Image (cartoon, rainbow, N blue to C red):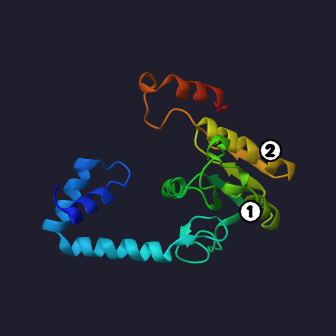
Amino acid sequence: MYGNLIDQLIDSLRVLPGVGAKSAQRMALQLLERDKVGASRLAESIVEALDKVGRCGSCRNLTEHEMCGICSNPRRKAAQICVVENPADLYAIEQAGSFQGKYFVLLGHLSPIDGIGPEQLGIDQLMARLNHDQVTEVILATNLTVEGETTAHFIADKAKAMGVSVSRIAYGVPMGGELEYVDGGTLNMALQSRKAL
């Protein structure tokens, strides 16, 4: 519609989550018409990140170093590992600011139908860390989906067999949430995972 290069830019912007055709078009035109310096900086940042960012050798989080800042921080509790499905989950927990242990990023969840088994999730690497780092607790923070629950149970069984304490993050009614607006599945989970006061 606009020409090959502009159409290609619009199409490339659509790979971003939540960006449809109209949003991609607005972004492309903004970058080309009003912010060429910002567009150039964005292009350089993407190329440099693609070139230099890899996976942490210990937890598999994204980093530009051999070990990420969390794994190399001596003040973090090495005996406590929180297992998450992806880096976005890790960042969400870090933003909450209360967890002081270390992490392991699965980069997905068990899904035999999609060909994702324990090997693809690095479960052997996780078990080696539990043994080598003398981990005393594994906190499972996989998503509350069928696949996430299956993955959590699989890891829990292996960790318990090694004598490691296993816990699961709590789920239920969000802070500030009103019960009348919470869905039935969430309410059921909240009731099942209740705790004494």
Q: Is residue 34 visible?
A: no
The reply, left or right, for residue 63 in relation to residue 26 is right
**Residue neighbourhood size for the residue with mark 1, other residues' Cα within 10 Å, grouped as few (<14), some (14–19), many (≥20):** some
Hey, which residue is sitting farthest left in the picture?
A: 33
Residue 70 sits in which quadrant?
bottom right
**Residue 157: which disc?**
2
Distance from Cα at disc 1 to Cα at disc 2: 16 Å
Give the number of the disc on residue 125. 1
Quarter location, residue 169: top right
Residue drawn at x 77%, y 59% as measured from the top left: 124
Between marks 1 and 2 in the image, the one whose residue lies nearer the viewer: 1
Q: Which residue type does callout 2 highlight?
A: Asp
Q: Amino acid at mark 1?
A: Gln
Q: Residue at x 78, y 57 (%)?
A: 136
Q: From the image, which quarter does the C terminus lie in? A: top right
Q: Mark 2 or mark 1, which is nearer the start of the sequence?
A: 1
